[in-house]
């Protein structure tokens, strides 16, 4: 290994007030993460590294600089050739964001919303690169829902604003990621697997505001996008309009529920039924809180009745 990557860049350089120093630290990090072995950083070293990166982004001021840096940091997940190392780097990101979120002031919150959005998008592209491997998806979901993760329902340190933001952007960024990788003919996205963290959050959270936010911002728009096109004498025109205004066209056209290796893309109506069934099954689990169970049963019942009417 070349001597210039024997040790990770020091966190203090990322937090420097000098832009040139911060830029150089980012470039050195790219080199280090691209060439270092998977276990090059211990957890304390990763935590220290991410604290430096966090304040590097904190210090970025102009909008174009912020956008470029957010994209550059997120793309590191794909720069790292080892999926295991990429996931370790991503876990460090989420642990840091959860820990530092409540300290972000209102003047900086928008740029951190943007940073989270960039990382969500590139995370999906990382899973696509791994062909939606079951173990990789499992590790990814675990980092979101375990203690310190942004969708952990029992960790009181998780800020509600962060969980809400993820509910708002998650499916949208999945659709964008599928559009970016369309030419690579990826396997269909395992939608049920990818939404498991939100089902788990809805089932286990004591915060009904979060439960409602997931329903309103994530589930309802998605179920609406998967609903059959209304029947009419002018059906061809309606189908054309629906296709042009569909909020998640790439996802609707290229998704399954669980195993993409054994299931091709499902018809949107079939996908909607299976998604509603997944909601029902999570609601039926004994560990699901009563208030959440009632709400999830109501979502399933309403969706099932609409399906029957459409048919």
Image (cartoon, rainbow, N blue to C red):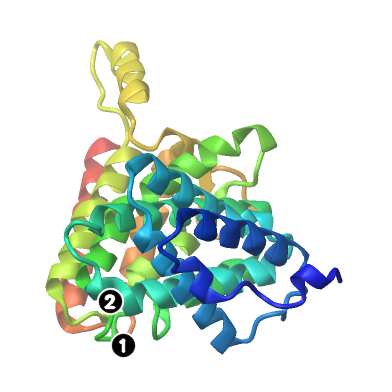
Q: Which mark is residue 203?
A: 2
Residue plotted at (58% across, 84% down): 45
**Image quarter of residue 40:** bottom right
Pick the residue in front: 185 or 257: 185
Q: Which mark is residue 287?
A: 1
**74 lies left or right of 132:** left
Q: Residue furthest right?
A: 1
On the question of residue 144 being in view, the answer is no
On the question of residue 116 being in view, the answer is yes
Disc 1 is placed on an element classified as loop
**205 lies left or right of 34:** left
Q: Position of residue 187 (x, y in %)?
A: 64, 47
Classify mark 1: residues with Cα within 10 Å, few (<14), some (14-19) or many (20+): few
Residue plotted at (26% across, 23% down): 231
Q: How many marks?
A: 2
**Image quarter of residue 131:** bottom right
Q: Which mark is residue 156?
A: none
311, above or below 32, in the image: above
Residue plotted at (13% across, 73% down): 208
**Image quarter of residue 99:** bottom left
27, above or below 138, in the image: above
Q: Position of residue 88 (x, y in %)?
A: 59, 74
Q: Position of residue 247 (x, y in %)?
A: 33, 35
The quadrant of the picture occupied by the N terminus is bottom right
First in sequence, mark 1 or 2: give its number: 2
């Amino acid at each position: 290994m070349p001597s210039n990557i024997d040790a990770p860049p020091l966190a203090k350089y990322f937090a420097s007030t000098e832009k040139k120093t911060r830029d150089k630290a980012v470039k050195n990090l790219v080199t280090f993460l691209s060439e270092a072995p998977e276990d090059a950083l211990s957890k304390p070293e990763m935590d220290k590294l991410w604290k430096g990166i966090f304040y590097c982004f904190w210090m970025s001021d102009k909008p174009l600089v912020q956008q470029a840096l957010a994209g550059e940091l997120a793309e590191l997940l794909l720069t790292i050739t080892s999926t295991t190392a990429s996931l370790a780097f991503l876990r460090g990101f989420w642990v840091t964001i959860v820990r530092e979120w409540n300290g972000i002031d209102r003047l900086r919150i928008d740029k951190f919303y943007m940073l989270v959005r960039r990382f969500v998008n590139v995370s999906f592209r990382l899973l696509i690169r791994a062909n939606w491997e079951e173990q990789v998806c499992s590790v990814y979901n675990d980092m979101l829902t375990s203690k310190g993760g942004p969708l952990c329902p029992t960790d009181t340190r998780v800020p509600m604003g962060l969980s809400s933001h993820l509910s708002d952007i998650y499916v949208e960024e999945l659709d964008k990621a599928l559009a970016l990788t369309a030419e690579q003919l990826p396997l269909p996205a395992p939608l049920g697997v990818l939404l498991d963290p939100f089902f788990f959050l809805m089932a286990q959270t004591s915060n009904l505001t979060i439960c409602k936010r997931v329903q309103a911002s994530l589930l309802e728009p998605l179920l609406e996008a998967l609903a059959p096109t209304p029947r009419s004498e002018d059906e061809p025109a309606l189908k054309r309009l629906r296709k042009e205004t569909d909020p998640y066209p790439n996802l609707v056209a290229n998704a399954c529920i669980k195993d993409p290796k054994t299931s091709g893309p499902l018809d949107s109506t079939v996908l909607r039924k299976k998604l509603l069934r997944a909601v029902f099954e999570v609601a039926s689990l004994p560990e699901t809180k009563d208030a959440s169970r009632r709400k999830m049963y109501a979502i399933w019942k309403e969706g099932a009745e609409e399906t029957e009417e459409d048919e």
